[in-house]
Image (cartoon, rainbow, N blue to C red):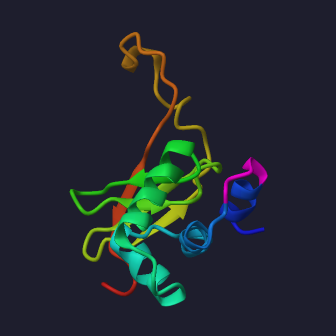
Amino acid sequence: MTMSDLLERLRGRGWRMTAQRRVVAEVLDGEHIHLTADEVLARATTRLPEISRATVYNTLGELVSLGEVTEVTTDGRAKRYDPNAHRPHHHLVCSRCGAIRDVHPDGDPLADLPASERFGFAVSGVEMTYRGVCPDCA
């Protein structure tokens, strides 16, 4: 099983799998997938030429609302869609080209935040982004 099992999860939920929705889910399914809406549209169009921009955007919005895909935004760049919503992970981002990789560092970042730095918050999650230059840009 890949890190993302988006299609299996959607089938398990009984999500109505029209041809258009299936194509969007197929484009998103896989490891290290962080596509913009326009990239999803371009890839979906090669598989299903009649798919519309509105259908792609609406499907992405629905997948985010369902909690099956998360939106990732880095450095003011376009939103990207991450299908690995059910496996905790962080991101490694290239500061030049914006490439994103999922990473799974050891340790518990929630536990790493001392009580004195929580300011009374009931902390429920952590989003960490590592930055650097990818091999293609180096």
- Comparing 2 with 25, the one in front is 25
Identified at 43% across, 52% down, the residue is: 61
Magenta-span inclusion, residue 105: no
Q: Classify 52 as above or below 136.
A: above
Could you tell me how many numbered marks the image carries? 0
- Comparing 40 with 58, the one in front is 58
Magenta stretch, overall SS: loop
Q: Quadrant of residue 5?
A: bottom right
Give the magenta part as a residue range.
12-16
Identified at 23% across, 57% down, the residue is: 75
Q: Position of residue 40 (x, y in %)?
A: 43, 74
Q: Position of residue 24 (x, y in %)?
A: 53, 70
Q: Residue furthest top?
A: 120
Q: Classify 57 as above or below 15.
A: below
Identified at 30% across, 57% down, the residue is: 74
Q: Position of residue 123 (x, y in %)?
A: 48, 23
Quick check: 6 left or right of 78?
A: right
Q: Classify 77 as above or below 53.
A: above
- Comparing 92 with 44, the one in front is 44
Identified at 52% across, 70% down, the residue is: 33
Quick check: 86 left or right of 73?
A: right
Q: Classify 19 as above or below 131.
A: below
Q: Quadrant of residue 138?
A: bottom left
Quick check: 48 left or right of 76?
A: right
Q: Position of residue 122 (x, y in %)?
A: 48, 16
Quadrant of the drawing holding the N terminus: bottom right
